[in-house]
Amino acid sequence: MALIRRLPWHGAAWAALRPLHAREVHALLLHGPAGIGKKSLALDFAQSLLCESPDAQGHACDACGGCILVLSGNHPDLRIVVPDAMADLRGPEAPVEETADGESESEDGVLSLSNEAREGGKKASREIRIEQVRALADFFGVSTHRGGARVIVLAPAESLNQASANALLKMLEEPPSATRFVLVSDSPDDVLPTIRSRCVLQRVAAPDRAVALQWLREQGVGDPDEQLAAAGGAPLAVMEESERQLDEATRSGLLALLARGTSLPAAEVAAGVPRTLPLPAAITLFQRWGWDLLAYRVAERVRYHPRHKASIARIAAASTAEGLLGWLRALGQMRATSDHPLNARLIVEAALFSYLEALQGARSGT
Ligand SMILES: [Zn+2]
């Protein structure tokens, strides 16, 4: 599940997608430049289709049973079809092992480890294989678990090979009922024309420079001007780069604090946070910890931090989904209020206090 959602420059595309809710369009192709968050938009749309009480703008509520299953990567009516090289997008069924050189973010703000690390030396495929498309037949064979839509997010569509594209085409020609395909592509010209012609095409525009810069500032990225230029105007590529900047010692130090859960004395928070650290990377680490706690609560699965499974199980057992969602929301806001890199340490401390409050709230039954 992409961690970066509801990007501010997706408003126009979102408005165009909304009528498709009602129109029962069964296949959609989101296309536009790389690094602008098309996969995030696809997941936002998928979640809105599975949400039990979307708001007036059609955005998912982030709080209902359907949303909690989507956010924790466990919704039975959502399938994410991506090449093995992007397997972490699929959800927690295949835990991602941590590597010594840490995690990195792919262009759309989702965890992506080196292929070698995941496959034990064997390179993970960059194609969507025919077996992955065929596996959808089982998904179509059963009625939807929650009585609503069945949603498939497939990205990037240009990574379908000839065999898998043909298998998908058959499904698009005779779509199963109540099923929505959301395809994503950086280069729709490389998608089989017969597939393209079965889809409603929706272009996703790159953000204006000012909007992208403002968003990057809100994410705590220092010198966004220079970085945005270096990334060719793609803000999610900038995030990918800035999130690579957490060194191993800082990363394991922060994880050690989180793993103590409610036994972490507030007095030790300040002592445990380094004097300087890259805020976006630290907040992303905290968000992944939060998603892991939520996924463990919902389905006893751990995705990002399998080495800390025992701590996650213990802390998750004493937490509530509401408390964890509250903390995740607070983390998003903390990112947004950081206007200067020198504040990073204070914000990280505040994030840890907020974590303790979320856990203690659950403990005292509030
Ligand atoms: Zn919802």
Image: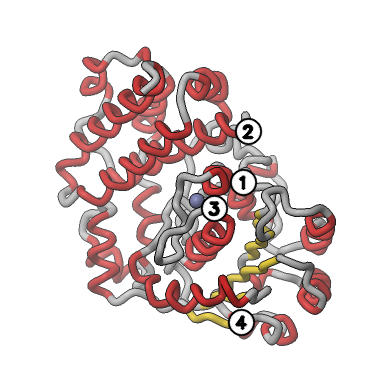
Q: What is the x, y in percent for residue 270?
A: 21, 23
Of labels 3 and 2, earlier in sequence is 3
Callout 4 touching callout 1 (CB < 8 Å): no
Dot 3 surroundings within 10 Å: few (below 14), some, or many (20 or more)? some
- Residue mark closest to the camera, 3 vs 1: 3
Distance from the alpha carbon under mark 4 to that under mark 1:
26 Å
Judge left or right: residue 292 versus residue 126. left
Of labels 3 and 1, earlier in sequence is 3
- Residue mark closest to the camera, 3 vs 4: 3
Q: Amino acid at mark 3?
A: Glu
Of labels 4 and 1, earlier in sequence is 1
Distance from the alpha carbon under mark 2 to that under mark 4:
34 Å
**Residue underneath mark 1:** 91
Callout 3 touching callout 4 (CB < 8 Å): no
Task: Describe the element under mark 3 as helix, strand or loop.
Answer: loop
Distance from the alpha carbon under mark 3 to that under mark 4:
24 Å
Dot 4 surroundings within 10 Å: few (below 14), some, or many (20 or more)? some
**Residue underneath mark 3:** 52
Q: Amino acid at mark 1?
A: Gly
Q: Amino acid at mark 4?
A: Val
Which is more toward the observer, 289 or 318?
318
Residue 299 numbered mark, or none: 2
Q: What is the x, y in percent for residue 161?
A: 76, 71
Where on the picture, by quarter, is residue 28? bottom right
Q: What is the x, y in percent for residue 330?
A: 31, 41
**Residue underneath mark 4:** 200
Where on the picture, by quarter, is residue 241? bottom left
